[in-house]
Image (cartoon, rainbow, N blue to C red):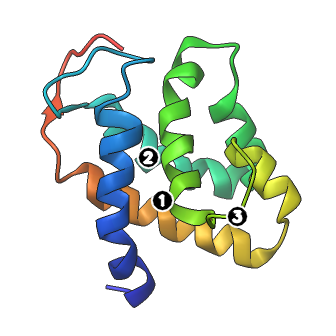
């Protein structure tokens, strides 16, 4: 496994726990479980980036227009938590990407997505959870 991703996994577990498993704003707490849909959401994000581009994939996932996109916001928040520094002021992943537009940013995001995908699989996945 890539060392960059290996180093991110502990931080990704914390981000998944904070932004997804215990996010009471989006859905009820499931005793530390993550709704199983998030395994699919994170798996499809990489394909969306390849097909539509990074900005479009993030904009779609942070959108407030559709229910599924609204439910993906905690995932985007977890990715942001993994890549931003303490002194970064952006509160949304798209804001971060637009102000830090580079191939290095895309690489950091894709590493974070991979680490988050592995981290989510360490949680109990709740099937049929009401999101």
For mark 2, what is the residue?
A: 42
Depth check, front residue: 116 or 41: 116
- Please tell me whether mark 3 sits on a helix, a strand or a loop: loop
Depth check, front residue: 97 or 91: 91
Can residue 53 be seen in this snapshot?
no
Task: Tell me whether the residue at label 3 lies in contact with that at label 1, contact meaning CB atoms closer than 8 angstroms.
Answer: no
For mark 1, what is the residue?
A: 113
For mark 3, what is the residue?
A: 87
In this picture, is 100 found above or below 20?
Answer: below
Q: Residue 100 — which label? A: none
- Please tell me whether mark 2 sits on a helix, a strand or a loop: helix
Mark toward the start of the polypeptide (3 vs 1): 3
**Other residues around mark 2 within 10 Å, as few (<14) / some (14–19) / many (≥20):** many
Can residue 101 be seen in this snapshot?
yes
Question: Alpha-carbon distance for marks 3 and 1?
Answer: 22 Å
**Does residue 36 appear left or right of residue 2 in this picture?**
left
Residue 62's quadrant in the figure?
top right
Report the residue that reaches farthest toward the front.
87
In this picture, is 124 found above or below 25?
Answer: below
Which label sits in the foreground, 3 or 1? 3
């Amino acid at each position: 496994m890539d060392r960059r991703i290996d180093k991110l996994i502990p931080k990704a577990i914390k981000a998944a726990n904070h932004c997804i498993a215990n996010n009471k704003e989006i859905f009820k707490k499931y005793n530390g479980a993550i709704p199983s849909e998030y395994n699919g959401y994170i798996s499809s994000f990489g394909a969306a980036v390849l097909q539509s581009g990074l900005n479009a994939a993030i904009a779609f996932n942070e959108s407030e227009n559709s229910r599924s996109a609204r439910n993906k916001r905690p995932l985007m928040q977890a990715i942001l938590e993994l890549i931003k520094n303490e002194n970064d002021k952006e509160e949304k992943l798209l804001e971060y990407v637009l102000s830090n537009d580079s191939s290095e940013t895309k690489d950091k995001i894709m590493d974070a997505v991979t680490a988050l995908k592995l981290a989510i699989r360490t949680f109990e996945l709740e099937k049929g959870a009401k999101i």
